[in-house]
Image (cartoon, rainbow, N blue to C red):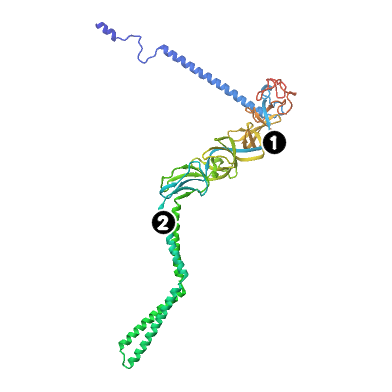
Amino acid sequence: MSTGKNCVEEKPSGRRQPGEQSPAVVARKQRRRRRTWLLYAVTLMVVGIAGGGGWWWFVQAAVDDGKPSGSPAAGAGKGGKQAKTLMVEVQQIERGEVAQFLQVSGEIVATESIVVATTKEGPITFCPWREGDSVRAGEKLIEIDRAIHRAEIEAAAASLAVARAKLADLKAGARPEEIQKAEADVRRWEATHAFYEKELARELRLLEHDAASQSSLEQWGEKLAIAEAELAAARESLGILNAGPTQTEIAVQSAAVDEANARLNLAHAHLAECTIVAPFDGKITHVHVRPGDLATPRSPLLEMYAHESLVVRFSVPEAHGAAMRPGLRATVTLDALPSRTFSAEVIRVYPQLDSVMRTRTVEAKLTEPADFVPHMFARLNIELQRAEDAVLLPAEAVITAPSGDHFVFVVDQGKAQRREVEIGMRQEGTVQAIRGVKLGQRVVVAGHAAIRDGQPVRIAGEGQPGDGSPSGGQGQGAGKSKPGQLPASGTSPQGKGGRR
């Protein structure tokens, strides 16, 4: 047992320490490192050769472009190789008419559309309408029963009649009977006054002979004073009756008549609010009540719109908002009527932009009558501007640089000349040229992908490069090339074989 224990604890002489690698693994890692470094070296060599070749080609092309066209080396590379001639297609610049259009979508809306409501409360006694009915201006729409307003009218009418009768009586003056009675009163008091005067005089004479007392004299004096006062009152009443009513009395009674008339008008106004009439000719779209329903203040009763007020309302982007103005012409198509095209004219431009969508609202009036319905979807083609005598370029001839500038290649004496152009309106593959080119020039429309300024070109269908000679003439290559294809190897632009 002891011998076995000693064998387990004893360490063999050829065993590796922990973390130590075998010779085979170390050899594999060394071979892998050598292959990696060799691959890096080959890659760097290939990149260097490619970069050097590209740089040499760029320098050589720049040298060739800088040589004069008449020199022997013009268009010839190293070893006498001629410059590349590209086959292109051209079109002639023409003059014509061009217009700019804006296509937007909108909907049919009614500018005169109302919701009929009432300020009175009561049962509805008249409402024969249904959706789609047409009404005329002033025609009765809704009637509400309010008996209290009819009673108010009757009471106000009676008060007005009384006030008018009083005013008429004042203006007519006193009756003859009243004047005769007043005159009789005056005569009676005059006789009474004369009698008292005589009795008073008699008492004075008796008092002088001591035949009457002082108290009797005083009594006849009081009776005479009363008679004088009554006579003055009777005479004043007679004068008033003869003069008639004063202007103040007439004015006061006239004001009473006006007040009674105002009360009557107020009663009529209250009753008129119970009857609602159509404010314009239109068509009913919604009916919310029927006869017998209880109308409440400010609750909707029915809705209607004026057919003559239908317009096309649409929104244009901010970029075209300033170009909108009344009078612009447009064509309108409706999805509901796809087979017809309608004419329209811009009649209203809203004065501000939508703060969220950054659009401007515009309204156009349809100039042709039709059975339009509100909220129909409409498509508009608006003519923004038109040029009758414009210089026109093919759209495929215009190239846009990364800077945003536009240019074309003009074929002149067998070479493509770059021309900066300012473009205007675009229409159906045609572009308006404001400046940069002239009428009659020919611009490249196909094959200009690899053209540089001054590049020799050959027009498809012509013999000499850009000279306009007929096809098949002297100097044409052995075979025709397609647009954009290089001539056959070893053939120069002049048709002579080049020396290598």
Is 459 located above or below residue 434 in the figure?
Answer: above
Q: Amino acid at mark 2?
A: Glu
**Image location of residue 367, percent across then percent down:** 59, 42
Note whether residue 455 is visible. Answer: no
State whether residue 328 is above or below residue 154: above
Q: Is residue 75 left or right of residue 378?
A: right
Please state which of residues 308 and 433 is positioned toward the viewer in this rendering.
308
In the image, is residue 143 above or below residue 59?
below
Is disc 1 placed on a helix, strand or loop?
A: loop
Instruction: Give coordinates of residue 188: x percent, y percent.
Output: 40, 80
Residue denoted by label 2 = 152
Question: Quick check: 406 left or right of 217?
Answer: right
Q: Nearer the viewer, residue 84 or 469?
A: 469
Q: Residue at x 32, y 85 (%)?
A: 219
Residue 54 spot, x, y in % from top left: 59, 24
Residue pushed farthest bottom? 209
Q: Which residue is mark 1?
A: 439
- Residue, far left: 1
